[in-house]
Image (cartoon, rainbow, N blue to C red):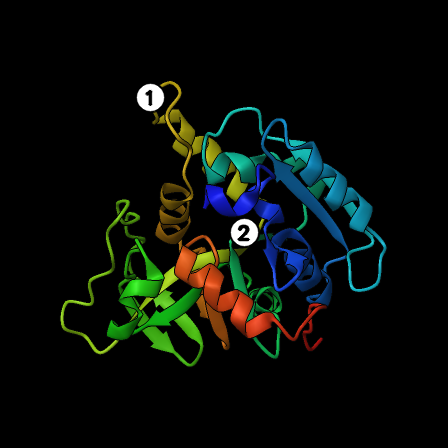
Amino acid sequence: MASLTGGRAKELMPVAGQPLLIRVLGECAASGVDEVLVVAAPNKEDLVDVATSAAGKPGMPLRVETVVQREPRGLADAIRHGQRFVGNQPFGVALPDNLFLADTPALRQLIDTYDRTGKNVVAMVELFPEDAERAGPTAIYPGKMEGDLFHISEVPSKGSRGSTFDLNGAASGVTGVGRYVFLPEVFSAISEVEKGLAAGAELDDVPVMALLLERGRLIGRRIVGDFLDVGLPIGYKEANERLVDNQQPRFAR
């Protein structure tokens, strides 16, 4: 996607005229989240400027702060950078390369599921054979659907680069995507996982979620709406086509 960023942070790639970051901040605000921490890589001053200047504007969270993740050690490490910010409160995580078209914002759907279950929640989307080209490398989660709740039986490893998912003959399957709700217990789980890693190894979210699942503290929520993976060229093109008439994020609260 480097040719699309123009040298700017990829989180600022425009989708139908709006940076990805602004669209995700709009989803957070529409989900009832008024305080957001943006975890940025080093030397992304443009990202920091856009994030902090958005605070308090119409449709945006009231407070937006930033923190720099000095080394790209993985998603779980990025999550840990928010420990002081969230304190002892449950919190959401929204990855900017995932967008959703939904009457109820995707993050709000996860918050509602947390309210019902009291568990950590990962967003799930249903995939069909025809989705292979637009889904990219991903892993199918085994488990059981109950309404829009997905009872995960195992957290699979992520697919390798260039691979696509395998339904093994099933009509459909589900995979986890970039929205989460975590309780503060996730920070101790991250520390436990880190203890078993080699020095400098990536601190990924998969073993952390697996540990939470082992303790009965993780559930999936199928998102009601359409998922757009804008980290892939085909998903980015589709997002621009479908959102071209929506110059402001529009979500039902």
Q: Earlier in the sequence, mark 2 or mark 1?
A: 2
| Residue 68 relative to residue 34: left or right | left
Q: Residues within 10 Å of mark 2 (few under 14, many from 20)?
A: some
- The answer to whether residue 213 is visible is yes
Q: Nearer the viewer, mark 2 or mark 1?
A: 2
**Label at residue 198:** 1
Where residue 242 appears, x then y in whole percent?
Answer: 54, 74
Front-lying residue, 27 or 231: 231
Front-lying residue, 174 or 225: 225
Q: Which residue is mark 2?
A: 95
Where residue 132 appears, x then y in whole percent?
Answer: 27, 65
Q: CA distance from mark 2 to mark 1?
A: 26 Å
| Residue 200 relative to residue 113: left or right | left
Where residue 113 appears, x then y in whole percent?
Answer: 55, 69
In what element is the residue under mark 1? loop
Could you tell me which residue is drawn at 37 percent across and 25 percent down?
Answer: 201
Amino acid type of the residue that numbered disc 1 sits on in the rendered structure: Ala
